[in-house]
Amino acid sequence: MKTQPPGRHANAIKNDLLARAYLDILAREDGVHSKSMLRAGSGDPSDPVEMILDDLMDTPAEGRVSIRPDLAAVAVLTARAIETESGLTRTLRRGTPVISIATHTPDRVDAVHRVITACALPSDRIVSTSDRQFRVGRDEALIIARDGTEKGHKPDSGNEAIASALHARSTIIGIAPEPRRQLPRDLIRSAEYHLILPEIDESALALVVEAVTGRHPARSIDQTTVRLLDIADLVLALRPDRSPDECLTRLEELVARKGEFHSDGPALEDLDGYGEAKDWGLELVADFADYKAGRISWDEVDNRGLLLSGPPGVGKTSYARALAKSARVPLVATSVADWNSASYLSGTLQAIKDVFARARKLSPSILFIDELDGISDRSRLRGDYVEYWSQIVNLFLELLQGIDERPGVVVIGATNHPDAIDPAVKRAGRLDREIAIQKPDAKTLASPLEQK
């Protein structure tokens, strides 16, 4: 069994030739008429012959069409994941491997499925996504793509199809954000390759820009933009009628305005009536400044978890917004009600993981979780909902405990009923500091009026 390392081998990919081939295939499938990405990556762009061919094949900007930037990005990342395993490109076309692919996020699952079907497998391969029986000797592939949002997206579902495909010696590919949680158990056990979709980096972004505009960017890309962008942002910023540098400028502007911090409302320094919570927050503001400047490590930040309690209307949400503004960090706001809006347990669990993942990506950041008493205390669970709520609480505790896995992320929970929260949430290393916010007195209420 081979497991792909999280990093990209420096010498594994030369000029992203496989990624360029995938981009050409997808462009042809979508009826896009543009110069070949593969040819552009195979030679010296300054060669006179190459320059003449570029001029002959280039389409005027006003008539240029490209594949969608988000699909192009997934194609590049999928190709890179495959190329990190020596010989896997050939095995996919001529052999019958069993592969799992981790996408990290649900929104990439369908795109990876399309890239694998259109680009990685031979065109005459019969692809199935159902649980029907497979026949020995037939050139078939079973692709199971699960985004984790449906009830059946779990390890004990779909194993009969895996057994049938294995017996028929078919190619088997599983695609999911977290394969071990969402794909059939037997697929994971029999997989020869466990691929991990890499994160987009500067070179991948440059290749996507080239695929969309027909030209490679002439300048470097702001690293903060690369770190904070989502693949969905590419659709908003990259257009075939713009130059590569114009696309990058637009992308940088778009990411910078993506709610990096809340500019509306007062800063924490301007708030009255928060007492101990304000002191805690101002200490965190100072630590965030030192952490971002590299003067202290994340281990040296004391205020990394807080449980805010108090009656409705005392401004727990306003406090989080003001704190994020003072610290000049992104605020990722969510609530237990948001998590529970999913139709199935799997969707709720995925929503919890997604919001923690977003806070990690925007680090340094503040993750604010409202209505925390909506997560039940396990000691009070009874009847049919014990297993349901236990899984939610256990996942939440697991994510809270992983402080080392989310450097730069401060978690603040808010509740009207602190006694209803599972005691494990308040243990050391989680939300181990509890501060109660009291209703403002007459002097505090009058303070904003006196300032006017």
Image (cartoon, rainbow, N blue to C red):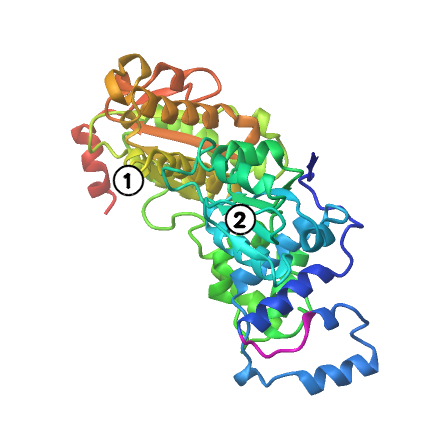
Residue at mark 2 to residue at mark 1: CA–CA distance? 29 Å
Disc 1 packing (10 Å; few <14; some 14–19; many ≥20):
few
Instruction: Give coordinates of residue 443: x percent, y percent.
Output: 19, 31
Q: Earlier in the sequence, mark 2 or mark 1?
A: 2
* Frontmost residue, 275 versus 137: 137
Disc 2 vs disc 1: Cβ atoms closer than 8 Å? no
The residue shown at (33%, 50%) is 264
Residue 36 included in the magenta stretch of the image: yes
Q: What residue is shown with label 2?
A: 143
**Image position of 199 (left or right of 56):** left
Q: What residue is shown with label 1?
A: 341
User: What secondary structure predominates along the stretch shown in magenta?
Assistant: loop
Quadrant position of residue 289: top right
**Image position of 361 (left or right of 223):** left
Q: Is mark 2 on a helix, strand or loop?
A: strand
* Frontmost residue, 146 versus 437: 146
Which residue range is magenta in the image? 31-37
Disc 2 packing (10 Å; few <14; some 14–19; many ≥20):
many
Q: Residue furthest left?
A: 442
The residue shown at (31%, 29%) is 414
* Frontmost residue, 12 versus 22: 22
Q: Residue 396 carries which label?
A: none
Instruction: Give coordinates of residue 363: x percent, y percent.
Output: 52, 40
Whether residue 227 is situated above or below residue 17 in the rendered picture: above
Amino acid type, mark 1: Ser
The residue shown at (43%, 47%) is 261
